Image (cartoon, rainbow, N blue to C red):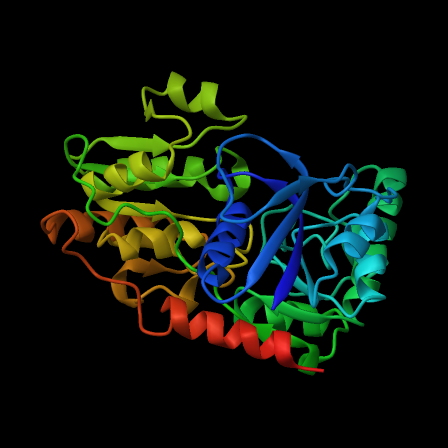
Amino acid sequence: MRILHVADRLSERGGADLALLGLLDALADAHESHLAVGRNDGTVRPPCPLGVVPGLDSRTRTGTALDPLLGRLRPDLVHVHNVVNPAVLEWAAGRHAVMTVQDHRFFCPGRGKWTSDGRVCGDAMEREVCAGCFDDRSYFEDTFRLTAERLEPLKRMRLTVLSAYMKRELMQAGVPAGRVTVVPPVAYGLDLEARADGPPCVLFVGRLVEAKGIRDAIEAWRRSGSDFPFVVAGTGPLRPEIEAEGVEVLGWLDRRRLSAACRRAVVVVMPSRWQEPFGIVGLEALTLGTPVAAWDSGGVREWHPGGELLAPWGDVGGLARAIRLAGARRVAPGQGVRAPHGFERDLLIRRLEAVYAAD
């Protein structure tokens, strides 16, 4: 099958980017893929031909020149990934495309199902409910309208999502259940032979923003009394604040270096405040044999082994106990708990191919 994949960007720096790369890599043996992106940050080379189409990375309604590409490639199928430009979504809906919904920007105009007063949001998107998370009414109205424009085309497409949590959210937003199939991501580019590149540590992997819970991770580590240093693999707006606290910040790491960092960790910490669409960092850590201490956020429990290392959302003390327990149970690098059954590459690709084959 010849497939045109349409995405906002080509990168190796975010969970959605890694999910796309893992899928392209897994499809390479059986299908002919072509990738069109709005921009390319130069961090990775894709496993298929690449073209840049301006406008695909726009967050608002922007015209794009996709029809000439469609005429030249004549694909059997269009698969859209992580695009939020309403014009592109409407274009895709008119061509019976498959769409992978990676995050909340289609049904939550706020902070990812996490309210401004610090609660998990279980409400469906409604104007007056969502307005409570905004101080500026004009900005809210613009954002709400844009979110609704993104949602409508989804109701006419075949959708894949990374977790059952995301399927429930889309159904609550009015997308028919029969249009949504759960296809978790494939762990991409990890070095399974990597050796630890430093002394044992407690590791946080991710963008340094409030939604990812970096402050909660540091507080939990301090409460745990762990003798292992706290290390961060990632960067973002909170980096100066985190470094000022004396935490070692490694910055963004490529796949090889991230694998080595996970191998030195006694535990990876994931206290996500926003509701995780999946949490691919945790699956990667487990694949490398590193335990994960996490909050029960969004789709996390669907891959997490559970037990004492999965704390209730918002429970810093529970996360501290999980860190302490993981440190006490410390095993040789790469010999920890592995990802649960059901995330094997061939199984997931067969599930995706069934979506491709559906009318």
Place residue 173 in its image quadrant: bottom right
Q: Nearer the viewer, residue 28 or 23?
A: 28
Place residue 57 in its image quadrant: top right
Q: Nearer the viewer, residue 251 or 266?
A: 251
**Direction from residue 192 to residue 210 in the image, left or right:** right
Q: Please state the total of marks drawn on the protein image.
A: 0
Residue drawn at point x = 36 percent, y = 69 percent: 344
Residue drawn at point x = 57 percent, y = 79 percent: 354
Q: Position of residue 264 (x, y in %)?
A: 19, 39
**Direction from residue 286 to residue 100 in the image, left or right:** right
Reply above or below: 317 against 178: above
Image quadrant occupied by the C terminus: bottom right
Residue drawn at point x = 38 percent, y = 32 percent: 253
Please indicate, yes or no, whether residue 144 appears anywhere in the rendered image. no
Q: Position of residue 128 (x, y in %)?
A: 84, 57
Q: Nearer the viewer, residue 40 or 172?
A: 40
Direction front: furthest residue: 72
Q: Nearer the viewer, residue 11 or 148?
A: 11
Residue drawn at point x = 55 percent, y = 68 percent: 165
Q: Position of residue 19 (x, y in %)?
A: 50, 54
